[in-house]
Image (spheres, rainbow, N blue to C red):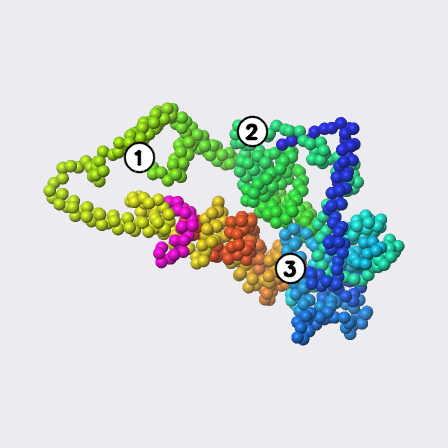
């Protein structure tokens, strides 16, 4: 923990220059300007990648249609295969439609055949969806206008780079089962890496993209032609278009790191910037010491935890609330997202704003879902690319403002929590209270017992009356006496090796002696049979060769637990038994099986894409139709019904109640998925190749986990590899 120090003003100016150079160098490295970047050079002749070239279209007309809110469909000009060759044929001629029809219709022509076109669109749509689900960033753009340029005068290799990039998405047409193109509610972008490359290599300032009313791509292309007309052989194709992936993930970082873009030198002069880059941090006294009792330092009325938090997490939350700078590290599953959830809730309670950033969208989703689950949806505003458009942000703000008039319930004093804490504290105090003059506590005694049990030692029978008053020195002296006695036994040997040594009943009657022979013979046969029966499982499980009656019941228990191992599941069972927390894994897999069952049922009614789209907004207008006949004539109800129909495989239910039930069914599947998604990484780390995420065989994995959890609770410890090997031999078992 540290605080920011201070430096003389003379050093400040020198450090300011160094920071400026550091930021400039970092910004240059953020924008890759080499020809390996598809924004610097696109080989449009290569059609094997995840790109789709658009032909016979005009940029201005396509932009006008898309920006006007219309969707466009793709038209295949080519044929799929040549006879006897199997190769895709690209069309080289224009069809029968006139030029005017091409400019005004809603079709985008390609040179691919119908089958090849649909396969290409399906692949692009899946990859775009995967990229957005993992990172929350859209990378699918319709590139308009390509600049052909050369790296120097002597170069004979032309380079092509897009100029205007329109953010788009592929949406499945439920009626035709094809993909349509629709513009996203985001601003069009210019080619920033190309802008940097032209500035650095040629001193050419590529103009910024300033989109106003009635703006057309040709307006921008005219500006580009004016600044590049002095370059020989350079040319601009204004109507060249390509649908493909272009990464702008570092664009905002590049702009944000511009020192001059921050008013009053706010970035370079920020306390954290100074501390991290050149001033360093002064050490601070820790907020908590090892001698502090956390219950006294953090009473219940001071805490504000909306989800569970242990002692280490509570300390982190208080460090952040006190305004300190810190780094928290921990492997997956240690509760970092829980801690972040509590930090955000506590900050909101204190009237502060929190910006939560993460590299993966899954991390954002986990924290957001936790906040929503505890009733704090109204304090959350999602700002990743999927929901960062103006319409979505304004809608969220409107919803939050409407909820501001609702007076929330204020919880009472944490009396029950304080009482529960005090009970637990009294138990802990009792565990650590000294036992007479022994120098021991209940906690230390239990620890020593666990140590002996872990070593496989049989518990002795001792006189309790003498133990509770025995001091530590008396114990040491007694142990020395026992050790000396053991040494004497080893040296002198036992007094007799007769099996009846120690027998006290020496006054048997003749009749008793006669019966004793029969009883001993029967006992010998039974014991011999038992010893033989014990040897097989003891050898198979590599257990200590102990011939004792006490082993029989636990061993029979273990053999019973070995039954029921699923077929061909030995490798999976070995991984599960090696897991540090089998119950947690079992719970996650059960949640996955429940989700899979619900998903299979829902797939009978819904199309697959329904589970990747948000449908929460449909419930309110449909629910209004249950309560009001007139609401069912309203535009919101009918619009929600149309959108629901697009998610269903069959016809739309007739009643509003049935339609709401469909939405609830879809929401339930999403909710069930979140229950095992939290432990997705943990399951993958434990199960390895057997874990395939949502495609995993949950039913089999649950059966293996149940078997492993049952075996882990056996009364005696057995080697996992031996147990699995024996369980796989059903006949022998």
Assess whether mark 3 and mark 2 are in contact (beta carbons under 8 angstroms): no
Give percent across and percent down for residue 26.
74, 43
Give percent across and percent down for residue 319.
61, 34
Name the residue nearer the viewer: 109 or 475: 475
Question: Residue at 17% of width from left, 37% of height from top?
Answer: 505
Tag 1, which secondary structure? loop
**Residue beneath disc 3:** 126
In which image quadrant can residue 67 be found?
Answer: bottom right
**Alpha carbon distance from label 1 to label 3:** 69 Å
- In this picture, which residue range is highlighted in magenta? 712-733
Few, some or many residues within 10 Å of mark 3 (<14, 14–19, 20+): few
Question: Residue at 80% of width from left, 64% of height from top?
Answer: 58
Name the residue nearer the viewer: 239 or 65: 239
**Residue beneath disc 1:** 461
**Alpha carbon distance from label 2 to label 3:** 52 Å
In which image quadrant can residue 220 be found?
Answer: bottom right
């Amino acid at each position: 923990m540290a605080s920011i120090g201070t430096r003389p003003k003379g050093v400040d100016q020198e450090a300011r220059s160094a920071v400026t150079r550091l930021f400039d160098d970092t910004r240059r490295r953020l924008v890759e300007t080499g020809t390996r970047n598809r924004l610097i050079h696109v080989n449009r002749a290569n059609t094997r990648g995840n790109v789709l070239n658009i032909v016979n279209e005009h940029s201005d007309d396509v932009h006008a249609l898309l920006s006007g809110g219309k969707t466009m469909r793709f038209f295949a000009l080519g044929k799929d295969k040549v006879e006897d060759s199997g190769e895709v044929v690209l069309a080289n001629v224009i069809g029968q439609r006139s030029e005017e029809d091409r400019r005004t219709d809603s079709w985008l022509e390609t040179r691919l055949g119908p089958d090849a076109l649909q396969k290409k669109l399906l692949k692009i749509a899946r990859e775009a969806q995967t990229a957005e689900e993992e990172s929350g960033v859209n990378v699918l753009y319709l590139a308009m206008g390509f600049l052909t340029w050369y790296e120097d005068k002597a170069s004979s290799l032309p380079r092509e780079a897009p100029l205007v990039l329109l953010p788009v998405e592929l949406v499945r047409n439920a009626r035709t089962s094809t993909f349509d193109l629709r513009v996203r509610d985001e601003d069009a972008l210019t080619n920033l890496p190309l802008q940097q490359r032209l500035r650095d290599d040629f001193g050419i300032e590529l103009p910024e993209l300033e989109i106003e009313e009635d703006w057309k791509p040709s307006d921008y292309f005219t500006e580009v032609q004016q600044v590049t007309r002095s370059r020989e052989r350079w040319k601009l194709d204004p109507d060249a278009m390509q649908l493909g992936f272009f990464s702008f993930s570092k664009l905002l970082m590049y702009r944000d790191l511009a020192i001059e873009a921050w008013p009053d030198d706010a970035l370079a002069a920020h306390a954290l910037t100074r501390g991290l880059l050149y001033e360093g941090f002064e050490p601070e006294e820790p907020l908590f010491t090892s001698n502090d009792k956390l219950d006294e330092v953090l009473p219940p009325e001071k805490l504000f935890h909306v989800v569970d938090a242990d002692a280490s997490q509570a300390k982190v939350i208080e460090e952040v609330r006190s305004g300190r700078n810190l780094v928290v590290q921990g492997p997956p599953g240690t509760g970092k997202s829980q801690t972040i959830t509590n930090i955000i809730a506590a900050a909101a309670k204190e009237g502060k704003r929190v910006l939560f950033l993460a590299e993966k969208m899954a991390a954002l989703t986990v924290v957001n879902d936790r906040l929503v689950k505890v009733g704090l949806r109204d304090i959350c505003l999602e700002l990743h690319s999927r929901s960062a458009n103006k319409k979505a942000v304004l809608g969220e703000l409107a919803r939050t403002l409407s909820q501001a008039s609702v007076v929330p319930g204020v919880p009472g004093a944490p009396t029950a929590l304080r009482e529960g804490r005090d009970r637990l504290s009294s138990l802990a105090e009792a565990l650590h209270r000294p036992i007479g003059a022994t120098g021991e506590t209940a906690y230390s005694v239990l620890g020593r017992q666990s140590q002996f049990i872990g070593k496989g030692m049989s518990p002795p029978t001792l006189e309790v009356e003498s133990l509770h008053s025995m001091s530590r020195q008396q114990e040491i002296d007694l142990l020395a006496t026992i050790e000396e006695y053991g040494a004497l036994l080893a040296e002198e040997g036992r007094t007799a090796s007769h099996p009846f040594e120690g027998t006290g009943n020496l006054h048997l009657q003749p009749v008793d002696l006669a019966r004793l022979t029969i009883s001993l013979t029967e006992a010998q046969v039974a014991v011999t049979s038992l010893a033989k029966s014990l040897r097989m499982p003891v050898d198979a499980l590599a257990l200590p060769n102990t011939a004792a009656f006490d082993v029989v019941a636990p061993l029979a228990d273990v053999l019973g637990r070995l039954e029921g191992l699923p077929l061909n599941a030995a490798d999976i069972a070995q991984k599960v038994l090696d897991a540090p927390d089998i119950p947690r894994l079992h719970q996650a897999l059960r949640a996955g099986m429940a989700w899979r069952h619900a998903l299979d049922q829902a797939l009978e009614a819904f199309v697959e894409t329904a589970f990747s789209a948000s449908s929460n907004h449909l419930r309110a207008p449909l629910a209004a139709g249950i309560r009001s006949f007139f609401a069912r004539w309203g535009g919101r109800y009918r619009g929600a019904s149309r959108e629901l129909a697009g998610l269903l495989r069959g016809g739309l239910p007739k009643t509003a109640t049935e339609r709401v039930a469909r939405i609830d069914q879809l929401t339930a599947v999403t909710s069930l998925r979140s229950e095992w998604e939290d432990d997705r990484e943990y399951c993958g780390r434990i199960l390895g190749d057997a874990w395939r995420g949502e495609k995993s065989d949950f039913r089999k994995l649950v059966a293996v986990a149940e078997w492993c959890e049952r075996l882990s609770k056996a009364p005696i410890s057995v080697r996992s590899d031996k147990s699995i090997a024996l369980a796989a031999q059903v006949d022998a078992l």
